[in-house]
Image (cartoon, helix red, strand yellow):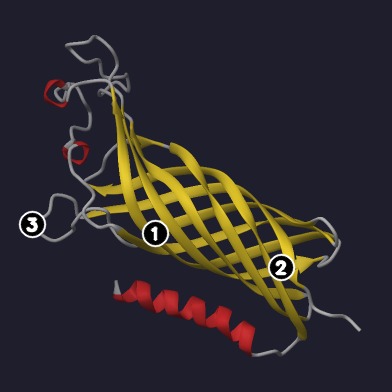
Amino acid sequence: MKKTLIVSAILLWVAWTGVRAQIGQYRNDLSLGVNGGYVFSTLGFTPKVNQTQHGGFAGGLSFRYVCEKYFSTVCSVYAELNYAQIGWKESILDMNDRPVVNKTTGVAEKYSRTLNYVQLPVFAHLAWGKETKGFQFFFQAGPQFGYYLGDKTEMNFELDKRNVTDRVNNVVRQDTMAVENKLDYGIAVGAGVEYSHPKLGHFLLEGRYYYGLGNIYGNSKRDYFAKSNIGNIVLKITYLFNIIKTRKD
């Protein structure tokens, strides 16, 4: 937790320094908008739980403040307030990599859990290219905070009748455990391309990776899981429209 706060403070300080210290060309551009996309997520369990990518929606509001252009780099602070569906989908296989069949139903067992979060990422946003009309390439990084709202489980077997014997991985404790830590935090990095038009606004296409530094379950010596952090890849589209624009005399 202490390391997380230090890393987050450094990233936020870098972003804030860009706002306060005008070394390059002055900018005062504020844009608001919306974003939406798809999240591919897994949980980093220790002991290990075999998984495939869990898919879900992520989207919400976007905010960007451009503070300066330093040589060819456009510097800004970018933030979002999102609703996101993340979680894990278990890969239930036997030692021959075949699906494990439930002995009661005769159907291959399936289990997934969707965790619903409100998320707040705050990024230092750097871009290169055309500002007002044309394309830019951008890179952004910063801390992300999330708050757990609830979850939904999907499975096709009864918990007391699941076929644990044939599984190559028989770690199943997570199937019945409730989320213990509602606050999530970590580091996110992203890159993408932006098209800007003076009248239509800004259109962004981005790929982003998030690594959670917290755990959804307790990780003390008496707890079952030593680690249960969130990791995901997000593909999203964002639209921003100008609220305040730098006056060019």
In percent of width and height, residue 155 lies at 28, 26
Q: Nearer the viewer, mark 1 or mark 2?
A: 1
Q: Which residue is drawn at 88% across and 80% down?
A: 248
Under mark 1, the amino acid is Gly
Going from N to C along the chain, the mark reached first, 3 or 2, is 2
Decide: few, some or many residues near mark 1? Use Cα within 10 Å; few <14, some 14-19, many ≥20.
Answer: many
Q: Which of marks 3 and 1 is in front?
A: 1
Under mark 2, the amino acid is Ala
Going by the picture, which residue comes out furthest to the left? 222
Contact (Cβ within 8 Å) of mark 3 with mark 2: no
* Residue 49 found in image quarter: top left
> What residue is disc 1 on?
146
In percent of width and height, residue 196 lies at 80, 59
Does dot 2 land on a helix, a strand or a loop? strand
Q: Would residue 227 be found to the left or right of residue 72 on screen?
A: left
Does dot 3 land on a helix, a strand or a loop? loop
> What residue is disc 2 on?
127
Instruction: Determine the CA span between mark 3 and mark 2.
Output: 47 Å
Q: Locate the C terminus by quadrant.
A: bottom right
